[in-house]
């Protein structure tokens, strides 16, 4: 019966433990599956991070590229369509064209730099996504390690299969495949020397050794993917991803991206610098254009100086937005060098001499070379501001005095903003507490290292004791271990909180030492077990009841899972429970010291802040006037220090074969983050760059190109300034001021035509028309010219100011116009009358029939048929009128249909030319021609085109009374037309070939 009871009990225990085994394996499978899912999601976040980082650069470069292209288009438009029409002095034209050319060059460089940065960042991002930041898909070994079979339950041993409930902690041995055993054997623990004699474990930092894998082989053995980006702990199958504190810290993919960012970060930064230089040159070009348009051409000094002030103020505001690390007055001092050329040019032009027509005379502009010198100085100042820094720390070679660079790196490489140190008490506090704060931070760092090392020792010791089977420990020892675990949790949490409050770089690894749930010894990897500071130490002593009221002492060998009695413990280390209690006390004392150091440091900082604030407030004057005076005095002592520092930057020797004008760090220059330095031994960098990892230094090519381009621009400004100086000194001159009369074609050469005049030289001519042959009017009648050069009488009646429109004639009358047909004039009939608007008196008149669609600005686009163009000279201006017509109507029908002639516009005539008068006018198609004093002027009424030519008269020529164009077979080409001019006395008929406008 007893045997049956025992068999039944054993069967029940066997079934209970098998169900327990199945339950534990299901929970393990779910936990490992969840861990793999979380790891996949984590690496998906890594890939999203890489895409976001690449997108940050690509989107910014797209904006820069678009802005640069638009600005370049503006420069081309200014070169082609915005050319200055007025007769401007040569030095202003040089300033205008050079500013526009420099703007185009800097913008072109900005576009090229933006393209390189965009392509490089996108290329390296794709390389990271396709080769290094891959999703950690579980390998076959990992999947095999998760399987569980009931045959594994049979291999647990009789003690585990028949374990009584509520007795001891049940630990199932993980049964792995042969491949996993081989991988574990390949990366097994190193051989340890034999222990000789009792020893005390040495206090070592567990943060450096606990949980670390010796190489990538073990990570590959457990199936870790993307091993270059995973920490060694992250490759283990028992990592708790949810409680890990590394989620908020830069991962390896971020560190790799920051190192790769050195290859295009400087292109990004100097692209922004080139855009700033290009925009400043565009504003300068607009300033010179406004000077020419308002001061040279239109004589409007008020508007001209107002525009100069507006554009130069814009340059100052743009500099405020671009530059950092300089005081506002220092930025203004830098921009004064660019403001001076525009102001000097405006003053020179406004104070220069002019002729009676308001044109600038050829004269000396003594201060014009100053403009070129100031612009070259301004380029030198901006070049010094754009000087790269960070060579000593192997950081990216960036122009850190540009504000945009401060926001270039979202991870803090460029975190320093000089403008944030603007408060007086902050400055005083920084100047006094640098040494004290550095010492306090170093003491806190040392205390943190000691505390975390002590915590690691206590955790290792407690882990070994918690892994001892429960049948070894007494009830008192088990309760003491529970109290020690509670103390460890509280102490570790306090240490971690203090480390997070410290916030100093380099403490991330220390925060990972504390384990919220202490792992058992059996769950450690062979490498972690070998690196344990208490490895091969016996645990005890434990007591065993031998019967008869006697006990024996024994120890437990955790590595071999066996008991060792006291007579065989010679030469072996023993970790006792009192020693564990002392280790925990030492850890708690170190934690208390760490808290006290932090409290004392905070109190010291608060006290120092109060003292400095009180001293600053006490030294501050009470009255507003005294405060202003003190402020100005303090600023005057600091003013210019940053500007002087720009010229104290040294140029080191050449780096390798690359011309690299990199500055040495100043004593006052802030120290940047050292975490961004390039380490050629880094595994990730070596994986990307290969054998060239040692040469993987930050790029300096953008700075070199910008520096050389600026030097070339300075050379051109200096050369133009030198030539201007030689011109003003009268030593050498190659640039001349071209007046408006010399800006078009060559002077017209006139040729006299042979004509047999009636009455010879006594013939007096007063009009000329070529619409129906050559018709010349005189006080005695109208004469028609023939091919033989003879004149025949056409009508014996004189018509002053006659204009012929085919078979119709038109002449000015008092308050209007009078018109006839040729037949009526020959018969001596009176002409018809058409009044002028306002009763104006025209001294001469000209007209012509054109298609209404040829002059849409005058009659609109909906008008059809033929329109009559009329122009006259009233002694002050040349009014132009249009009579709307109809299809098939002649000039006489249009004049009869009109009620009055109402001019709609007037040809522009300068006051000086209007005072000298107009000698003759003529309408040819849509063009109005006027013969002025010594030159010929033309306007196209259908477009804004115009022309002006100087006439060279023969010596015997007299004032001209008529002009017209004739179709002649002797024309020289399709682009010229013969012009006939009739002199009043002499008489003489002249011809000239005039280009078409």
Image: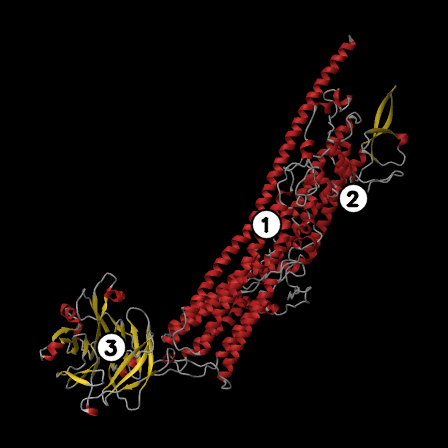
Looking at the picture, does residue 398 appear above or below residue 534? below
Q: Give the residue drawn at x 46%, y 74%.
A: 343
For residue 125, which numbered disc appears in the image?
1
Q: Earlier in the sequence, mark 1 or mark 2?
A: 1
Where 545 falls versus 533 (above or below)? above
Q: Residues within 10 Å of mark 2 (few under 14, many from 20)?
A: some
Secondary element under disc 2, as helix, strand or loop, is: loop
Closer to the chain start, of discs 1 and 3, is 1
Image x and y of residue 684, in percent:
67, 49
Q: Which mark is residue 204?
A: 2
Which is more foreground, mark 1 or mark 2? 1
Residue at 68 percent across and 27 percent down: it is 25
Q: In this rendered view, identify the residue nearer to me: 797 or 787.
A: 787
Q: Where is the C terminus found, in terms of image quarters?
A: bottom left
Say few, some or many: other residues with alpha carbon within 10 Å of mark 1 (under 14 / 14 to 19 / 20 or more). many
Q: Nearer the viewer, mark 2 or mark 3?
A: 3
Asked if residue 622 shows in the view, the reply is no
Question: Residue, x 50% and y 79% (percent of image)?
Answer: 369
Colouring scheme applied when the structure was drawn: secondary structure
Residue 534 at x, y = what percent?
A: 80, 38
Tags 2 and 3 touching, CB below 8 Å: no
The mark lying in front, picked from 1 and 3, is 3
- Label 3 environment density (alpha carbons within 10 Å; few <14, some 14–19, many ≥20): many
Q: Where in the figure is residue 91, as x and y percent of width and height?
A: 46, 77
Q: Which mark is residue 959?
A: none
The mark tally for this picture is 3
Q: Residue furthest top?
A: 1
The residue where tag 3 is placed is 922
Look at the image and tell me in which quarter the N terminus lies: top right
Q: Secondary structure at mark 1?
A: helix
Q: Secondary structure at mark 3?
A: strand
């Amino acid at each position: 019966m007893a045997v049956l009871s025992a068999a039944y009990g054993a069967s029940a225990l066997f079934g209970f433990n098998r169900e327990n085994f199945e339950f534990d394996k299901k929970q393990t499978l779910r936990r490992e599956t969840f861990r793999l899912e979380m790891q996949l999601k984590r690496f998906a976040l890594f890939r999203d991070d890489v895409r976001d980082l690449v997108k940050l650069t690509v989107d910014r470069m797209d904006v820069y590229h678009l802005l640069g292209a638009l600005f370049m288009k503006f420069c081309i438009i200014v070169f082609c369509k915005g050319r200055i029409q007025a007769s401007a002095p040569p030095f202003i034209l040089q300033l205008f064209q050079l500013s526009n050319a420099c703007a185009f060059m800097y913008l072109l460089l900005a576009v090229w730099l933006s393209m390189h940065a965009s392509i490089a960042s996108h290329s390296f991002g794709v390389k990271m996504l396709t080769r290094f930041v891959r999703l950690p898909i579980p390998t076959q070994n990992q999947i095999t390690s998760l399987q569980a079979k009931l045959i594994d339950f049979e291999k647990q041993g009789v003690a585990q299969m028949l374990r009584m409930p509520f007795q001891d902690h049940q630990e199932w041995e993980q049964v792995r495949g042969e491949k996993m055993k081989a991988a574990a054997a390949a990366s097994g623990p190193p051989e340890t020397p034999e222990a000789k004699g009792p020893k005390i474990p040495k206090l070592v930092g567990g943060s450096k050794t606990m949980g670390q894998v010796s190489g990538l082989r073990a990570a590959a053995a457990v199936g870790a993917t993307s091993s270059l980006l995973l920490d060694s702990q992250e490759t283990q199958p028992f990592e708790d991803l949810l409680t890990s504190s590394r989620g908020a810290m830069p991962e390896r993919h971020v560190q790799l991206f920051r190192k790769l960012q050195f290859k295009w970060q400087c292109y990004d930064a100097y692209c922004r610098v080139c855009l700033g230089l290009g925009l400043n040159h565009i504003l300068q070009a607009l300033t010179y254009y406004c000077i020419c348009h308002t001061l040279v051409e239109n004589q409007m000094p008020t508007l001209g100086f107002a525009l100069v002030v507006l554009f130069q103020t814009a340059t100052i505001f743009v500099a405020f937005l671009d530059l950092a690390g300089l005081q506002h007055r220092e930025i203004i001092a830098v921009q004064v060098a660019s403001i001076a050329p525009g102001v000097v040019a405006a003053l020179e032009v406004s104070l220069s001499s002019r002729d009676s027509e308001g044109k600038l005379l050829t004269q000396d502009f003594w201060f014009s070379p100053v403009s070129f010198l100031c612009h070259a100085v301004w380029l030198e100042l901006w070049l010094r501001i754009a000087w790269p820094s960070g060579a000593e720390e192997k950081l990216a070679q960036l122009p850190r005095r540009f504000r945009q660079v401060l926001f270039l790196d979202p991870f803090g490489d460029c975190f320093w903003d000089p403008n944030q140190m603007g408060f007086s008490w902050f400055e005083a506090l920084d100047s006094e507490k640098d040494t004290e704060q550095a010492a306090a931070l170093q003491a806190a760092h040392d205390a943190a290292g000691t505390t975390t090392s002590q915590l690691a020792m206590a955790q290792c010791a407690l882990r070994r004791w918690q892994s001892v089977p429960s049948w070894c420990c007494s009830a008192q020892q088990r309760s003491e271990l529970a109290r020690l675990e509670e103390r460890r949790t509280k102490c570790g949490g306090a240490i971690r909180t203090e480390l997070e409050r410290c916030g100093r770089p380099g403490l991330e690894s220390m925060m990972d030492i504390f384990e919220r749930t202490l792992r058992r010894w059996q769950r450690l990897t062979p490498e972690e077990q070998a690196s344990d500071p208490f490895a091969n130490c016996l645990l005890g002593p434990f007591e065993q009841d031998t019967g008869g009221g006697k006990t024996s002492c024994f120890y437990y060998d955790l590595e071999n899972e066996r008991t060792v009695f006291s007579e065989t413990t010679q030469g072996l280390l023993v970790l006792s429970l009192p020693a564990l209690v002392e280790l925990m006390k030492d850890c708690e004392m170190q934690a208390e010291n760490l808290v006290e150091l932090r409290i004392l440091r905070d109190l010291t900082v608060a006290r120092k802040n109060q003292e400095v604030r009180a001293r600053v407030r006490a030294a501050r004057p009470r009255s507003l006037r005294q405060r202003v005076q003190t402020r100005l005095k303090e600023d005057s002592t600091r003013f210019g220090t940053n500007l002087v520092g720009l010229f104290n930057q040294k140029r080191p020797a050449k780096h390798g074969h690359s011309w690299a004008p990199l500055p040495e760090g100043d004593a006052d220059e802030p120290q940047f983050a050292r975490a961004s330095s390039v380490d050629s031994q880094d595994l990730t960098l070596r994986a990307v760059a290969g054998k060239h990892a040692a040469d993987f230094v930050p790029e300096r090519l953008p700075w070199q190109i910008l520096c050389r381009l600026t030097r070339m621009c300075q050379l051109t400004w200096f050369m133009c300034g030198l030539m201007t100086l030689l011109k003003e000194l009268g030593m050498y001159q190659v640039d001349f001021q071209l007046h408006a009369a010399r800006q078009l074609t060559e002077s017209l050469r006139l040729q006299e035509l042979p004509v047999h005049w009636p009455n010879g030289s006594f013939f007096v001519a007063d009009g000329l028309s070529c619409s129906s042959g050559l018709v010349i009017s005189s006080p005695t009648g109208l004469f028609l010219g023939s091919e033989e050069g003879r004149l025949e009488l056409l009508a014996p009646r004189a018509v002053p100011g006659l204009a012929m429109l085919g078979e119709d004639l038109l002449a000015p009358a008092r308050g209007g116009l009078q018109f006839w047909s040729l037949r009526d004039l020959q018969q001596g009939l009176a002409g018809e009358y058409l009044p002028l608007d306002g009763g104006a008196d025209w001294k001469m008149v000209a007209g012509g029939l054109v298609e209404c669609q040829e002059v849409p600005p005058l009659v609109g686009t909906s008008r059809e048929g033929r329109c009559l163009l009329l122009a006259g000279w009233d002694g002050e201006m040349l009014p132009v009128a249009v009579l709307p017509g109809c299809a098939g109507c002649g000039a006489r029908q249009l004049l009869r249909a009109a009620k009055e002639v109402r001019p709609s516009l007037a040809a522009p005539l300068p006051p000086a030319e209007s005072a000298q008068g107009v000698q003759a006018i003529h309408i040819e198609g849509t063009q109005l021609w006027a013969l002025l004093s010594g030159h010929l002027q033309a306007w196209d009424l259908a477009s804004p085109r115009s022309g002006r030519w100087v006439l060279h008269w023969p010596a015997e020529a007299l004032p001209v009374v008529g002009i017209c164009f004739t179709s002649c077979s002797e024309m020289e080409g399709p682009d010229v037309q013969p012009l006939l001019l009739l002199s009043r006395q002499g008489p003489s008929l002249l011809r000239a070939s005039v280009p078409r406008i």
